[in-house]
Image (cartoon, rainbow, N blue to C red):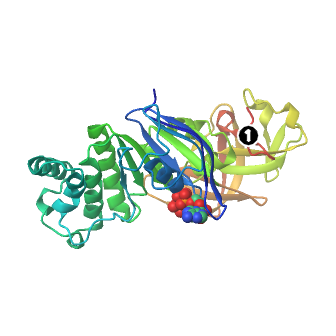
Amino acid sequence: MSHLILKDINKIYPNGFHAVHNFNLAVEKGEFIVFVGPSGCGKSTTLRMIAGLEDISKGELLIDGERANEWGPREREVAMVFQSYALYPQMTVFDNIAFGLELMGVDEDEIDRRVKNTAEILGLTEYLDRLPRALSGGQRQRVAIGRAIVRKVGIFLMDEPLSNLDAKQRVTMRSEIAQIHRNTGATTIYVTHDQTEAMTLADRIVVMKDGYVQQVGTPKELYFEPVNVFVAGFIGEPPMNFLRDTLTDGCMRFGEQKIDLRKKPGARIAEYEGREIILGFRPEAVSMQPVPDACALTANVELTEMLGDNANVYIEKDGARAILKTTPFEMPETDTEITFYVPYSQIYLFDGETEYVIQ
Ligand code: ATP
């Protein structure tokens, strides 16, 4: 039996706005699930329904096989970490972490032991007497996480916990969260709009858009087997390149140059002849040297971005544009003409109307 099951969950706010549509997911014990998607897609609403902070309008939430829709937040044995930290400003770090245990009536010695143990795990031992205002953003976030893990609940819910940190702190805290998850083994649901956080932390990712789940899968599945243009474009940085064209004689065009899709193994394109399709290829899937079974294309270099470990190359040909990712050693000069190679196996095809992948 899965630890947590969401069955056709819907949220309709009192003003009539339908924020979440038929959300289905079974979460195994100890799994790290990330909800990802653009602002307003319903990630937080879904998390808050799991937490018991928001009513479920339709559908069923099961925790360890039991219907939990009517349970209060405490009965659900979940701990939530918010983006805002939500620390009590007048309480020390120790008291902030201890507060939940005091409410639960845990005895003083046990509280002392558990708070100190948690502080140790999170590197907060030397700050236990400080007030939140005397801490950095990263340290405050650690206290917020400490408050959640000290309760030793089975389900850990995190809503954009890193969004108030600077870029460097985010990377550090990201690996700390992964480490904490390994140590506690708690089932975790984590909300973010950052695909890098999603890809690095998740066992499985749920991609959402406009209140609908688009795809559920491991980071690898989402990267290699996106079901639609939205998921394909959301996962990966820079995003996948898309070319929209009418399929003519089995070919698509990049500018005026033909890409012969009959050379793509297993491409089921016959029924698309004369219809619009979307061709996608990832910036990092191209090669700057000839490779077997690849389509050779030429283009002009409009702009380059040297990032150190790689470079982004913005190209244009007859009005068609794309971004290529190269090693820093291969980065071409701006305003030169280059030839690049797109392996047919790395080409994705989507229905121009539904934007779903052509199997
Ligand atoms: P963000 O990343 O910006 O937090 P999100 O994906 O978490 O976005 P939600 O906060 O779940 O999105 O909101 C989903 C949709 O529901 C949004 O369009 C939002 O405006 C709407 N919404 C949220 N709360 C309410 C409310 N109390 N009443 C009506 N609509 C709401």
Q: Is residue 87 above or below residue 203?
A: below
Residue at the farthest left position:
109
Lateral position of residue 100 relative to residue 316, left or right = left
Lateral position of residue 104 relative to residue 83, left or right = left
Q: Nearer the viewer, residue 352 or 117?
A: 117
Q: How many marks?
A: 1
Lateral position of residue 232 relative to residue 2, left or right = right
Query: Quarter of the image holding residue 320?
Result: bottom right
Q: Which residue is identified by label 1? A: 349
Q: Residue at x 50, y 50 (%)?
A: 49
> How far from the left and from the top, in percent, is residue 205?
51, 42
Q: Residue at x 87, y 33 (%)?
A: 271
Q: Kindly tell me whether residue 240 is visible in this rendering.
A: no
Q: Kindly tell me whether residue 73 is visible in this rendering.
A: yes
Q: Is residue 276 above or below residue 88?
A: above
Query: Quarter of the image holding residue 159?
Result: bottom left
Task: Sort mark 1 into few (<14), some (14-19) or many (20+) by Cα contacts within 10 Å.
Answer: many
The quadrant of the image that shows the N terminus is: top left
Quadrant where ligand 1 appears: bottom right
Q: Secondary structure at mark 1?
A: strand
Give amino acid for label 1.
Leu
The quadrant of the image that shows the C terminus is: top right
Q: Is residue 90 above or below residue 356?
A: below
Q: Residue at x 45, y 42 (%)?
A: 33
> How far from the left and from the top, in percent, is residue 110?
12, 46
Q: Nearer the viewer, residue 348 or 102?
A: 102
> How far from the left and from the top, in percent, is residue 299?
70, 54
> How far from the left and from the top, in percent, is residue 98?
19, 56
Within 8 Å of ligand 1, the CB of disc 1? Answer: no
